[in-house]
Image (spheres, coloured by chain):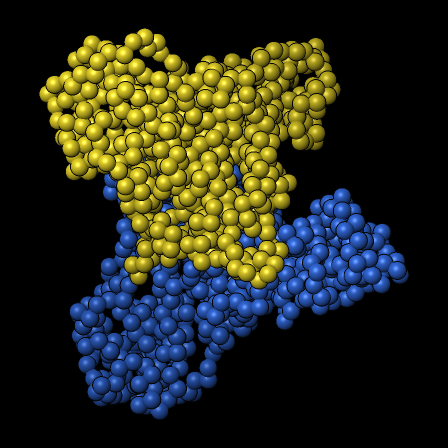
Chain colours: A blue, B yellow
Amino acid sequence: MRVSKSFTKTLKNAPADEVAKNAQLLIRAGFVHKEMAGVYSYLPYGWRVIEKIKHIVRQEMDAAGANELLMSTLQPSDIWEKTNRWNDAVVDNWFKTKLLNGTELGVGLTHEEPIVDAARAYLSSYKDLPMSVYQIGSKFRNEKRAKSGILRGREFLMKDLYTFARDQKQHEEIYEHIAAAYTKVYARLGIGDITHRVKADGGIFTPRFSDEYQTISAIGEDTIYHVPGTDIYFNQEVAPSYAPLLPQPEEQSDMVSYHSPGIVGVAQLAEELAIPVERTVKTMIYLVDERPVAVALRGDYEVNEIKLRMALSAKTVELADAATVTQVTSAEVGYAGLIGLTPGVDLIADDSIEQLVNFECGANKTDYHNVNVNWDRDLERPAKFYDIKDAKKGDLDPTTKQPYEVLRSVEVGNIFPLETKYTDALDMYYADENGQRQSFVMGCYGIGISRLMGVIAEHFSDEKGLVWPEAVAPYQVYLVSIGTEGAKKADEFYETLQAHKVEVLYDDRDERAGTKFADSELLGIPHRITISDRSVVEGEYELTDRKSSETKKLTLEQIIATLNTVVDK
Amino acid sequence: MRVSKSFTKTLKNAPADEVAKNAQLLIRAGFVHKEMAGVYSYLPYGWRVIEKIKHIVRQEMDAAGANELLMSTLQPSDIWEKTNRWNDAVVDNWFKTKLLNGTELGVGLTHEEPIVDAARAYLSSYKDLPMSVYQIGSKFRNEKRAKSGILRGREFLMKDLYTFARDQKQHEEIYEHIAAAYTKVYARLGIGDITHRVKADGGIFTPRFSDEYQTISAIGEDTIYHVPGTDIYFNQEVAPSYAPLLPQPEEQSDMVSYHSPGIVGVAQLAEELAIPVERTVKTMIYLVDERPVAVALRGDYEVNEIKLRMALSAKTVELADAATVTQVTSAEVGYAGLIGLTPGVDLIADDSIEQLVNFECGANKTDYHNVNVNWDRDLERPAKFYDIKDAKKGDLDPTTKQPYEVLRSVEVGNIFPLETKYTDALDMYYADENGQRQSFVMGCYGIGISRLMGVIAEHFSDEKGLVWPEAVAPYQVYLVSIGTEGAKKADEFYETLQAHKVEVLYDDRDERAGTKFADSELLGIPHRITISDRSVVEGEYELTDRKSSETKKLTLEQIIATLNTVVDK
């Protein structure tokens, strides 16, 4: 492509409301056009990057044996009503629209239901399994706020894959098979070394974790916990945590019932007693599957409801209402503690309080706290301590007892056990060898295609602009002509490069060399070739590497030979 | 791909509500899944066909120098308000949706406005022109009724291209340049010989015709008029028509004012007088750019409002209300005629009445008609007769005076002069050599990608199923194994074919030969290779052509050599 024939030009400025670096650079370089917050169009250079990402993803999904298809965007409500995902109170980010006759339709935000509905006609026997299908298309999510440029949009391109298996064992095989393909995708995109498989919440329909693929990035919205020296990563939301041990008093003091009117919460209590909050114990009353339990953890931690749900194999976990708290603690809200709970209410104690000596907590009596509480002496030590706290910086991995490395990251993919939820809800089953009706075990697997462009743009950039990895660069070579003789030679070499199947963007404009160089750098094309009047005389031409800025003087034959070694055709 | 690993199976029946042959076949063969009326998902085989059509279209658009991009589906209202296309009274087939804060958004039904809005940042000088950009993506149209299977949907895939030119001359050059690319596309798809460039209505913003690409098809919704022996085709809506001359009385009779209470319209009048309707003249009062005119044509014709608008270079043409009719004719509605119109009201006479002798028409007097009216004697012969009638079967091409060939067809593409409408409305201009502000001249160019799959499916099919042309077939070869030795050999040959880059669908199932053959035929794969136990012994294998059913016995080497001559890799 000649720059003179390109649709876009580089821009001096990005829109003032665009704060994310990826969107600023992509807009200035003419890769995307912002239609509204969270909605971008892909202009020709950007579309080439997207197509290259799609190509890599498609090749790996095909190699993994998945069938590509394309589901519709418009969605009839009936299939979503069967899984209770049509209800706006359950799924709060639908875009909905209407037929002229008033019938409500959805604008596809995901595709589990329609995939199951389509599969119904084809998958009916164990012989049909395992099966995997995928698509690359647009998703629409009515997010309250769109942010981070093209990283979190209201309309975005996604690869979503779905697997159907006959049982948990077959599901796990295909799940790992697709996971292996994911690893290849990120490696080919050039972000393999900064992208990690991370354990995350699996949701209420599975006792298992899901897996996220997280790319380390300072602008990431996620926090991940890495066990040093291993490839084990956890999303902060599920990271197992062991609280570093703190020095404890050597001797037990007498327990005191402390009158503390108006003192509510461990922060106030610690301040009142002039002690560190780590000496206090926080007791929260939860409804777990609608049954009240007391959850206790060290004052400097927060309850992690996902861990609590998984620890108790529960479906629902929610903070109890005031009436329940009063019933369980015989006190107003704010004075829950460990001693004197209503009989029959289980105490779920976090392991952060297992070794405390002389700790403080609520007294289950309005306006009173207990001071210098000790296990065994003042109350029975629980048979089991749990890990039901949010991990925080400084926490230890429970297995190795090493402190975690805590990192910011962007989710660039996820794989998810769906168990039998969608197929059962849509009343779809298969027949086993004995003709018995059986539930399918499903998985779903996403990769954010447009988000990846943003992540790569954000990560591979410098003060001059974008720095695309070879595999996703819109063009491999930026050819610059300078002067009359330079232009003649460049015209010729442009044809030669194309004959060698090198993707080349030829800056044939009547512009200053500096302008052309600056554009080449902003666009982030991996290799720049400069053909000037002088180089024509010398017979040697500059080949400049975008990443290192290193320039070599070579003959045109040498340049082609060099490109042949690096360019993936 | 192995059939045993394919997502879909062939089905015995299509849904009962699916009447179109293309959708019936595509559903039975597992190419598409119907989500709701007018909304289909593309299953793996169908998606392969779509990708092949996209590939051909993309190659030709790229070769024509167009830049590919992808515009968003979600549309902010402001840019559409500027062209008055947000108003549901003007554009009646929007799907609209809302952000959580209540802001209305559109779901992209076309993309002129956003393309212009995006181009604003990049096209500002005559040096940037001409420019063409295109995309291949989904369009959404809230049609009252969806019909004809995947030919007319509510959600469909389309290639839309937009050109920007500096003036009408440059516009016409690029318009013809893209038109030439269209011709190549249809030829490569295998429908070149039945697809024609057809003149059609250009709309109110241009004095020019648009061009449609129409594929001859019995299920077509369009009627086209072909001038025999030429490559000139018109959409019926704009076909110039010359009425075949009918015998006229040799002598003029006396004009009579005929009392005809309750006789309204030429059909009743002809019956009352026991004459053919071709002896009557129909007079309709129209408002042309809000000015009343009388439009007269032979009783057996209908007024063509597009021709009327173009003949009078008008913006708007509509039937007058009753009050205007009474004012113009001094009579109730139903008695308009040629003699005695209110002075100042122009008579626009169709050429079908130029040669009439002793004709009948309304008398511009309630309950009266004039009988035996003659030009020159009873009223002044108009200085000019127009062609403002709907063409009908039997009409002559005005130039050659030969009767038209009238054909049913499906629109598979259109190209359209947009003049300066969208850029002017969105306040976008360029600077010419003198720095003067100038309007762009735009064009838009569509190809219905998913519709093409339907048209090709419908056209290339027989009683056994689909018959894909080589260029768009989901696979080139259907490989059938029969028996144990056959299966071993077929496993081997499947690998060999893939190594030769032949796209092969391998029916490795444990099914009867007849079932495999029937599936092969329903799927419409161009070539079938059968490897049976017996053929392994003989060393000769069947190669069967789907279209002709012709079978040759060849060695595997000969089969590969034969495929190499027909298969486009």
Provide residue B138's location: percent of width, then percent of height. Answer: 45, 42
Provide residue A556's location: percent of width, then percent of height. Answer: 83, 54
**Left or right, A497 with reference to A339:** right
Residue depicted at x 41% and y 22%: B241
Q: Is residue A467 above or below residue B3?
A: below
Which quarter shows the C terminus of chain B?
top right
**Left or right, B125 with reference to A150:** right
* Viewer can see residue A237: yes
**Left or right, A354 with reference to A370:** right
Residue furthest left in the image:
B261
Residue depicted at x 32% and y 76%: A282
Q: Quadrant of residue A227?
A: bottom right
Nearer to the camera, A503 or B356? B356
Q: Is residue A107 above or below residue B247?
A: below
Q: Quadrant of residue A435?
A: top left
Residue furthest front in the image:
B377
